[in-house]
Amino acid sequence: MIVAIDGPAGVGKSTIAKLISKKCGFYYLNSGSFYRAYTYNQQKLGADPFDFPLLLENAKKIKLSIRDAQICIDGQSVEDKLHTPSVDAVVAQVSAYAPLRFYVNEQLRAIAAGVDVIVEGRDITTIVFPDADVKFYFDANPEVRAKRRFLQHPENESYEDVLKIIKMRDDIDKNKPVGALKIASDAFYIDTSYLTTEQVCEKVVSAIFSCKKR
């Protein structure tokens, strides 16, 4: 079974997807972590993250894997390196590079083959898994999302800077030539702005069980 979740940054996709993976015994995949890991790898090598052909070349030289819901490069977890200001500043542009998107999508489909999986990202319901068993689109207003991100990492940037980045990412995500953020016609739309994690989780689990009964 494939459960797909799309939505902009800061709507709670990762939090809910991780909870559902534990509650339902699903394998958890976050497509955004792949783009972040490749961005981090490029920066670690001292290379220009905007040299997209080189970034893709370097991406193909490493192996990404998921262990305990954490992304690893060549077997070593880099989860704590993926949400730094330096990665945040460029990952939206990196993820808009079409050849890299095709490469990441191939990996996601290969990992998901034959297992129960919950996947989150920007184009999971529309491009990566258009035939997913259950689809969701999470949304929330930018101010709420910026506050959530700021509280997660208050030591890094001001709330105003986080809000600016959130709005910039929204604009890039919705206008990508490939894999643009859209609401699938058959997706459950959930505005998480003023819902608790438990309330959102309940809606998702209910839809999953309804699908299994069908």
Image: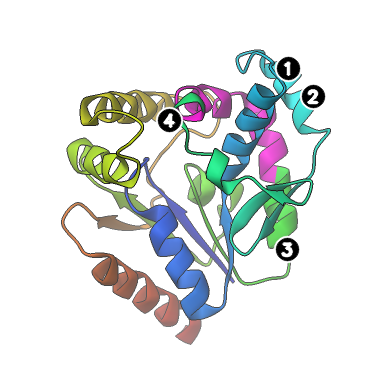
Q: Amino acid at mark 3?
A: Ala
Q: Amino acid at mark 4?
A: Asp
* On screen, residue 200 above or below 129: below
Comes first in the chain, label 3 or label 4: 3
Comes first in the chain, label 4 or label 2: 2
Front residue (pair 31, 160): 160
Secondary structure beneath disc 3? loop
* On screen, residue 159 above or below 119: above
Q: Which residue is mark 1?
A: 53
Front residue (pair 214, 158): 158
Q: Which secondary structure is most common in the magenta stretch?
A: helix
Q: Are marks 1 and 4 in contact (CB under 8 Å)?
A: no
Q: Amino acid at mark 1?
A: Pro
Percent of width and height locating residue 9: 37, 40
Q: Which residues are magenta?
A: 87-105
Q: Amino acid at mark 2?
A: Glu
Residue at coordinates 31% horizontally, 75% vertically from top-left? 202
Residue at coordinates 51% horizontally, 28% vertically from top-left? 87
Q: Which residue is mark 4?
A: 173
Q: Residues within 10 Å of mark 2 (few under 14, many from 20)?
A: few
Give the Cα distance between marks 1 and 4: 20 Å
Q: Are marks 2 and 1 in contact (CB under 8 Å)?
A: yes
* On screen, residue 174 above or below 138: above
Q: Which residue is mark 3?
A: 113
Query: In the image, which disc is placed on residue 57?
Result: 2
- Residue 75 in view of the camera: yes
Comes first in the chain, label 3 or label 1: 1
Drawn side of residue 24 relative to residue 12, left or right: right
